[in-house]
Image (cartoon, helix red, strand yellow):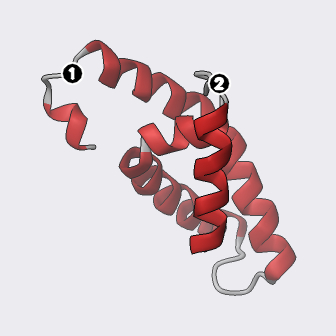
Amino acid sequence: MCLCLALLMQVYSRKSATSIDPLMVFGRAALFYYILHVHLLAGSAKAVGLWRSGGLLTTATATLAVLVVLYPLCRWFAKVKRAYPQSLLRFI
C-alpha cells in the first residue's frame, strides 16, 4: 500500500487534478463517504437478504454499486465544504 500511495503521489504531482477525479472527490469527503457507505451496504444487504451470506463477487458488486451511487453525493458535499470553509463541515 505504501508503494501504491507513493506512485499515486507521483502521478498527482505531475498532473493537475480536476474536480471530477474520483480519488480527489472521495478524498475530500472521506468521513462523509465512510459514514454513508457503511449504512448503505448494511441496509441494502439486510433488505435483499444477503446479510452475512454473500460471497466475494457479491461484495465486489455491492461495493462498486455504492461507489457509483455515492460519487455524486460526495462531489456535492465537497463543494459545500469548499463554500463554507469555516463551518464544522470541515471536520467531516
Residue 32: x %, y % from top left: 39, 45
Furthest-top residue in this view: 83
Q: Would you say 57 lies left or right of 44 here?
A: right
Q: Is residue 87 visible?
A: yes
Q: Would you say 51 lies left or right of 62 here?
A: left
Which residue occupies the foreground of this view, 91 or 66? 91
**Residue 3, labelled with which disc?**
none
Q: Amino acid at mark 2?
A: Ile
Element type at mark 2: loop
Q: Which residue in the structure is indicated by mark 2?
A: 20
Question: Which quadrant is the C terminus positioned in?
Answer: top left
Which residue occupies the foreground of this view, 92 or 54? 92
Residue 73: x %, y % from top left: 53, 31
Q: Residues within 10 Å of mark 2 (few under 14, many from 20)?
A: few
Based on the displayed image, in which of its 4 quarters is residue 35 positioned? bottom left
Q: Amino acid at mark 1?
A: Pro
Q: Would you say 55 lies left or right of 36 here?
A: right
Element type at mark 1: loop
**Residue 85, labelled with which disc?**
1
User: Which is nearer the N-term, disc 1 or disc 2?
Assistant: 2
Q: Is residue 70 visible?
A: no
Residue drawn at the location 55% of the way across and 67% of the way down: 42
Which residue occupies the foreground of this view, 29 or 7? 7
On screen, residue 31 above or below 83: below
Based on the displayed image, in which of its 4 quarters is residue 85 positioned? top left
